[in-house]
Image: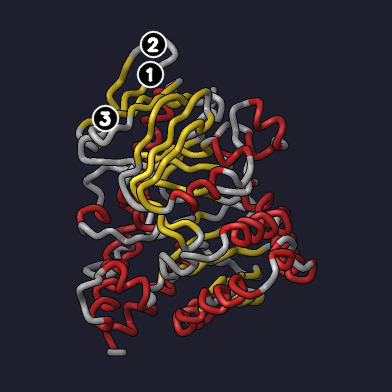
Amino acid sequence: MSHTENDKLREYARLTVRQGVCVSEGIYVIIRCPIIAVDFGRMVMEEAFACGAKDVIMQYSDSKTARVRFENADISQFETLPAWQAEQTNFYAREGTVAISIVAEDPEAFSGVDGAKLLASAKATRTALREFYEIMDAGNLRWTVVAYPSAAWAKKVFPDMPEARAIRCLWDAIYRSVRIGRGDTVRKWQKHDRLLKRRAAALNRYAFTSLRFKNSLGTDFCIGLPENHIWYGGSETSGDGHVYFPNMPTEEIFTMPHCMKMDGTVVSSMPLSYQGCLIDRFTLVFRDGRVVEHSAEVGEDALTRLLDTDEGSRRLGEVALIPHDSPIRAQNILFYNTLFDENASCHLALGRCYPNTVRGGELLDEDALYTLGGNHSINHVDFMIGTEDLSVIGITKDGIEIPVFENGNFTF
């Protein structure tokens, strides 16, 4: 690795720790790191200690090892998570931690694996780590997701390139997406954060009761919004007052839809990588907030598995607006990775909502939140619907229609 490349990687680690999760004195740090990214993971670990972390807990993963287990172990081994394994993560959440997830997986790492085993594993993990996620959803746990390019992922994105060049090109795309290079990275993030906050504030002033989406792909969809919903964008502030960025990159303005008030047809605009399987060119038909019909040209079995995870997986927990002219979209790259593709396109999320996207929601239990329109599920899976001709109309409580998007971009 050249001196310049090492400097960029070190800057990326610093950005992750200082802006991503804002590591503070005396706090624990959990890093979820694929083994392909071990060197970067160590850099992140060093930066966390430099910021005063009490301890850093590294949780390594390997999709190839996981695949061997899925192919050979009985399904019963995936239906529960050992108590000791769950307690490690839940313990640190109780004690006060921040969580950093590094993603580097092959988009099709689990293609062909028994879907029942993947579903059982997802359910067991979510159930066992419920305490961790409840603390996170209440705003008391800072977290971020960043990326590291594996060879398999790079070759998926740039199939016609030699492997080394594909990895280099994916690194360049990641650095551009997180604003590393050509100037003060922190200052650029602060400027970007102000723009996202301004747009979120404008949407909050309108207090729309519903949004109507339409484009030439076939999306024709109306989504209701709960009373007192809140739009967020960019950085968030934890319960103890620290500012952090849950996703790096991030281009979205998002809120909670009313999970019982969605009607119409939604057509995907980009592939979705779900549990290592690719789902592409899919259509969802909603009635009274629930998916009642679905189809996919690629990965229909995986889509069915997602929708059948639980009742909440057929309803939406998030609606997010991203202009077509975003910096990530401008690269004209299909990343096959939700962290990036969702920030190049307006998207929706099947599954659970973020409780803080309705006023006081983080203080409510699941039943009380549901009465306000907040969806509950073990899933939260983003899929992309934005196009260059997407229109979004906001409808106020007085029935006034306000253009929010025209030709794929914000009107304000």
The reply to whether the C-beta atoms of the residues labelled 3 and 1 are less than 8 Å apart is no
**Viewer-proximal residue among 375 and 209:** 375
**Please, what secondary structure does the residue beneath circle 1 have?**
strand
Mark 3 and mark 1: span between their CA atoms?
Answer: 13 Å
User: Which label number is shown at residue 18?
Assistant: none
Question: Which residue is disc 2 drawn over?
Answer: 399
Amino acid at dot 3: Ser
Identify the residue shown where x is 20% and y is 54%: 330
Label 2's element? loop
Residue indicated by mark 3:
391
Q: Provide residue 293's location: percent of width, then percent of height.
A: 47, 33
Residues at circles 2 and 1 in contact by the CB criterion of under 8 Å:
yes
Q: Quadrant of the C terminus?
A: top left
Please tell me how crowded label 3 is: few (under 14), some (14-19), or many (20+) other residues with Cα within 10 Å: many
Residue underneath mark 1 = 395
In the rendered structure, which amino acid carries the disc numbered 2?
A: Gly
Give residue 406's quadrant in the image.
top left
Residue 341: percent from left, percent from top: 34, 54
